């Protein structure tokens, strides 16, 4: 299809990096997704340092306004202004929190007579809750899906099993469940590199409660009893940092944990993976996580809880280990990999396991799923 014959796409996103000019995962998704749409407009949450951006010739970023309770109204106003300027073939809503995006998308879709798709990347509290709050949040997600399942044209599932089965349990009709995996990888950037190993383990994530970072620190303290010099690198930023610092001091892990902060691009993240021996995920709930798969692409075996796509990808003992949500299991998984005589073999198998998730074909499948939905292919 010629570029000028392609439809326009309106996205209501929760991404907090692209409006600050940062090259996070969503930036790289847009870099390829833009090839399948004439124009993509993205409304993102307000935050300090946010500004309108044009990261690519046909991609436009619009920071929203308003507080949490009024944000849906602001998003709707911005969306209506864009709808008056041009026609869109589809609205995609990244749904989370108080569902400002989804509530705004419903009205925009109805007024413009176009479909909208709800994308829920992970459900707090599923399969495990990080705290009591996530039990309440899971109920709110259930309520939203009950409200939206008669309004949305489809619900995207970013993994093959976990989210589709939850949608079915919540009464979403099978024909409205679009399985379009979100773990697409740049296999030219995320590759094994001949660099010095600086850490035993690495985790790349936002520093927030569902990532299980306190659980990981508890596991590290247990592992330290057997391996006193065990080391962990943490890549990412988030509101949990002060809590993590206090927990590290309490456990006496100051010499074992190093925070690398935000890294500027995929090349820097790939190098960070390569300086470690194993990539770890301690999350209570996830959609992917893509970062764990990136580490596998760099030739690192993975130790992960049973979240998102991990049970689909990890074969315990072959390319990593699946563990339970307790420090003992996570600690044992880490030590088993680090002490393995087959660490290199595990790493080779990990890289082989993620080859089907190549970036270009993955984004193409994602775009094609939506273009088929609106009859544009």
Image (spheres, rainbow, N blue to C red):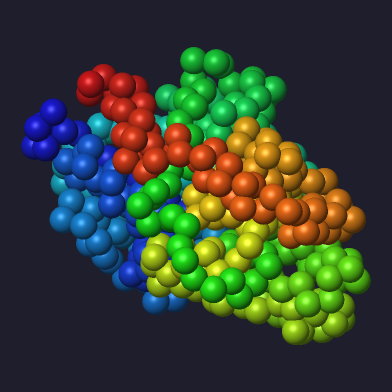
Query: Closest to the observer: 223 or 245?
Result: 223
Question: What residue appears at the point 61 percent right and 53 percent down from the top-left corner?
Answer: 344
242 lies above or below 94:
below
- Please state the horizontal and vertical placement of residue 36, each as a whole percent of the image: 23, 37
Where is the C terminus found, in terms of image quarters? top left
Image quarter of residue 252: bottom right
As displayed, is residue 362 above or below residue 64? above
Q: How many labels does the image show?
A: 0
Please indicate whether residue 284 sits to the left or right of residue 96 in the image.
Answer: right
Question: Along the line of sight, which residue is nearer the eye, 77 or 164?
Answer: 164
Image coordinates of residue 263 in percent, x first then y, are 46, 72
Task: Judge by depth and name the residue closer to the eye, 221 or 17.
Answer: 221
Residue 126 seen anywhere in this rendered image of the structure:
no
Q: For the view shown, which residue lies furthest in the front direction?
A: 341
Q: Residue 108 placed where, x, y %?
A: 35, 38
Picture residue at 36% right of the left edge, 30% below the top? 365
Residue at position x 83%, y 63% in the image: 219
Give the quarter of the image for residue 244: bottom right
Q: In this view, does 256 lie to the left or right of 152?
A: right
Q: Nearer the viewer, residue 183 or 137?
A: 183
- Please state, as top left, top right, bottom left or bottom right, where the N terminus lies in the image: top left
Q: In this view, does 261 lie to the left or right of 66?
A: right
Is residue 279 visible to us here?
A: yes
Image coordinates for residue 202, horizontal then vertical, percent: 63, 65
Residue 196 falls left or right of residue 254: left
Residue located 47% across and 66% down the image: 194
């Amino acid at each position: 299809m010629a570029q000028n014959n392609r439809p326009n796409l309106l996205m209501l996103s929760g991404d907090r990096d692209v409006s600050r000019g940062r090259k996070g995962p969503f930036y790289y998704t847009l870099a390829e997704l833009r090839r399948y749409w004439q124009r993509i407009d993205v409304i993102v949450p307000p935050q300090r340092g946010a500004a309108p951006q044009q990261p690519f010739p046909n991609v436009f970023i619009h920071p929203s306004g308003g507080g949490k309770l009024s944000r849906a109204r602001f998003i709707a106003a911005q969306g209506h202004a864009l709808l008056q300027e041009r026609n869109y073939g589809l609205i995609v809503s990244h749904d989370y929190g108080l569902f400002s995006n989804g509530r705004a998308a419903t009205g925009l879709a109805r007024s413009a007579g176009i479909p909208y798709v709800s994308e829920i990347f992970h459900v707090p509290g599923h399969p495990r809750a990080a705290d009591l709050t996530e039990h309440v949040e899971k109920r709110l997600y259930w309520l939203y899906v009950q409200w939206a399942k008669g309004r949305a044209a489809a619900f995207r599932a970013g993994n093959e099993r976990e989210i589709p089965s939850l949608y079915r349990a919540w009464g979403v009709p099978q024909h409205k469940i679009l399985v379009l995996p979100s773990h697409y990888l740049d296999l030219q950037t995320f590759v094994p590199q001949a660099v010095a190993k600086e850490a035993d383990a690495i985790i790349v994530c936002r520093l927030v409660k569902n990532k299980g970072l306190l659980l990981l620190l508890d596991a590290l303290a247990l592992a330290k009893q057997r391996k006193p010099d065990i080391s962990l690198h943490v890549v990412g930023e988030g509101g949990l940092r002060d809590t993590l610092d206090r927990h590290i001091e309490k456990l006496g892990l100051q010499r074992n944990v190093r925070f690398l902060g935000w890294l500027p691009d995929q090349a820097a993240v790939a190098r960070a993976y390569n300086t470690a021996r194993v990539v770890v995920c301690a999350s209570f709930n996830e959609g992917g996580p893509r970062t764990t798969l990136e580490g596998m692409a760099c030739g690192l075996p993975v130790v992960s809880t049973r979240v998102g796509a991990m049970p689909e990808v990890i074969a315990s003992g072959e390319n990593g280990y699946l563990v339970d949500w307790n420090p003992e299991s996570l600690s044992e998984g880490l030590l088993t990999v680090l002490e393995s005589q087959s660490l290199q073999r595990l790493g080779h198998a990990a890289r082989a396991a993620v080859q089907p998730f190549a970036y270009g074909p993955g984004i193409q499948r994602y775009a094609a799923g939506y273009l088929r939905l609106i009859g544009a292919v």
